[in-house]
Amino acid sequence: MRPLAVLSCVALFATAAPAADQPVKALNAYPPSLKIRGADDAPQLVVTGVLASGRQSDLTSASAYTVSNPSVVRVDKDGRVYPLANGSAVIAAKAAGQSVDVPVTVEGTEAYRPINFTNQIEPVLTKLSCNSGGCHGKIAGQNGFRLSLLGFDPELDYMTLVKEARGRRLFPAAPDQSLFLVKAAGVVPHGGGKKMEVGSEEYKLLRRWIASGLPYGTVEDPVVTKVTVFPETQILERQSRQQLVVRAHYSDGSIEDVTRRAQYESNETEVATVSEFGLVQSQSMTGQSGVMVRFSGVVTVFRAVVPRPGPVTEFAFASKGPIDPHTAKKWKELGITPSDLCTDEQFVRRAYLDITGTLPTAEVVRQFVTANDSAKRDKLIDRLVETPEYAYLFANKWADVLRVKRRNQTERAPGTFAFHSWIRDAVAADKPYDEFVRDIVCAIGDETKSPPTVWYKEVATPEQFVDDVSQVFLGQRLACANCHHHPYEKWTQDDYWGIAAFFARVGKKQVPTPGRVVQNQQNQPQFVYTKATGSVTNKRTNKIAPMKPLDGEAITVSTEEDPRVRFADWLTDPKNPFFAKAVANRYWAHFFGRGIVDPLDDMRVTNPPSNPELLDALAQTLVDNKFSLKALVKVICKSRTYQLSSTPNEFNKSDKQSYARYYPKRLPAEVVFDAVCSVTQSPSDFPGLPKDRNAPARALMLPDEAFGSYFLDVLGRPQRISACECERVNEASLAMTLHMLNSQEVQDKLARANGRTDKLLKDPRPDAQKVEDLFLLTVGHKPTAEQTALAMDHLAKNEKNKKQAYENILWALINSKAFLFNQ
């Protein structure tokens, strides 16, 4: 038995009792009536109990079924209806003292419906994982047998099965002896293992197709236009279940139940899992899960909401701004109580790190805490977004995904330095985000007059243009649609090459600079211009691809126009459903450690936002403020949600999605490095770094990846190989821990002459005050009485070598979680 089948069996024995034993007021059935066509049509029935509270509970497998005319249909214990003969009947489902009737008519049982390879056989190959990337669907196939990935090229798969290797895989004269069947059923050895049982529905369908002469179908046959799932959303108690019904809608208006032929996948298995038969099983964690449903290349999603068990606890939460009403609504839906607001000490450190990537000084913390001003938090945020440090922090974030990369080639340094400076200046001046993106996408000229053209050194082909633009600016990962239909989205190769076509007329040429010697001519300054002609070829059709934005119509561009301008018009339009949401989600993830859609640049229909209304509100805020990113930062940081404590309570301790508390997150590599340099008063030294008269050299100021630093690398600095923020590693690691604990680099900074510890020795204040300063500077709060006593005791024991004693205290502080994490 396959693992998914085991999961299904386990789920069937889960408790069927309604939530908290609430009485059932009524039963509903879906579909409310059934019309069965053909001997192989066996639709799924879902019986739902309406509880006294108004919630609904799936009672499908807890119901007893009777049929008014047992010769017409039978119903198994899981609610699946099987035709027996033509005619009419009424199915009565009874559970918890209630009942519901489902009229059913059956026709065409005297014969099976004609088989269409694309509509019936291909989904079986996908369901059994035959055409998955780990089996015959990979580019080179498996053991000499290759299928298209997830069945997105049925014609190729048909030819491979029927014609390749002289047709040895299929034997219509003796279907049961077909190599294709006996291998999949485990009758003979198969490298992929046993995929189905002899006599199973999949086996019978494949055998009938072979015995019927291997029909492919005709051009008049209907095609799948959409797939729907019932229910679309459901609130589930912990350790409960929900049977899904999946229906394929065809171009001729017909509808078919494909529940047992569809594929399912949960994006949050800690919240809910799903069996191969569409039975969703909620787990013991509160939250939300999106279950992808895929059939014949078309996808949809079911959303499971699992609230905290027990009565809902009332909470007081003073909303402030457009964010808080939506988070509070979600907490009430999940039965979660938010944490209290964080302290002033926590907030000032959190805001400094999140907005500027720097630590506040001990004096700044003291002044903020003692200030008697109810608006001091808002004023601090307003002040921080106007600092140079804010510009450097967010320039670094954008430089990562825009791949400001020198590749250790000295000749490229002027370009990367210029591009980074342009990004930093744009962030500092709060250049509207739509203009910022337009300037990059439509860059023209050379790096001296138009630094964004440096982007086109890394984005050198139409494919790279699509991949980077879609991921960075649209939150869509379209790369796989280069070669085949997107496996988790609606995007096709036509969509992919439609965007690539906008890049086809980008021209580049090297421009030698007088007095500038380069070893590689390819590293000469590059001039980007627009050609009068140019096209790309759609890999699927082998024809020239028309220019076409996502979900848009094809565009014709004259020879005098730059096609990228037309693309940018669509891209930055406030009505674009992806643009504002993508950057709003990216910035939300920066401040909360997790996107409303997570991963933050994978915004597909099968990976739904944990709070759609919140994401919509953030996007609308951005549009209303004319794409001001500073305004977006202020709205996020001034919200009560952002200012919650990181300390969980008994109601939200398992929360990972609804932001009912601040999620502690490890500081980025550059921020940790700069913080260590700051608290030890040991300035960094990066030879070749452009000098900023207004600020000392810091890691966050590095314009590209070519500045060597083992410290930064071991803490997860990205090499900017891709446009994905996932390249940066912010999780703690053993190598990072050992470096912070034992490296000579850190030890040298602690012991540096005229550094922090030397200055502490010369400071005439009492040791207790100096220890307090160290705590405020490193971890943002005063030491507890116990911590003070330990520090004073250590200093007293090392009176003859106080410098070493202070080094030890500082070493202990910078290796604490309170220092390495923003809380």
Image: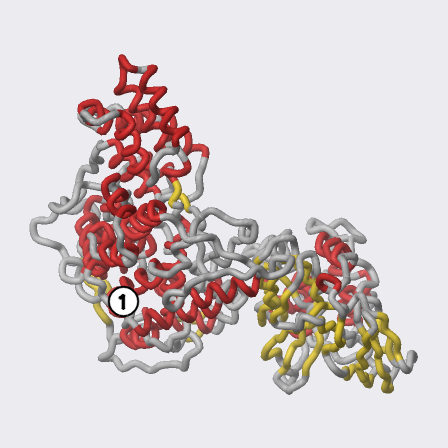
Q: How many numbered marks are there?
A: 1
Of all residues, the one furthest to the front in this rendering is: 372
Residue at 74% x, 82% y is 32
Please state the horizontal and vertical placement of residue 358, each as a whole percent of the image: 27, 45
- Residue 624 relative to residue 336: left or right: left
> In the structure shown, which secondary structural element does the residue marked by tag 1 occupy?
loop
Please state the horizontal and vertical placement of residue 614, each as a whole percent of the image: 44, 67
Please state the horizontal and vertical placement of residue 138, each as a whole percent of the image: 57, 56
Q: Which residue is mark 1?
A: 628
Q: Viewer-proximal residue, 478 or 214? A: 478
Placement of the C terminus among the 4 image quadrants: top left
Please state the horizontal and vertical placement of residue 413, each as a whole percent of the image: 20, 48
Q: Label 1 amino acid?
A: Ser
Q: Viewer-proximal residue, 642 or 345? A: 345
**Within 10 angstroms of label 1, few (less than 14), some, or many (20 or more) residues?**
some
Say whether residue 288 is visible. no
Q: Viewer-proximal residue, 337 or 62? A: 337
Residue at 41% x, 65% y is 319
- Residue 758 relative to residue 317: left or right: left
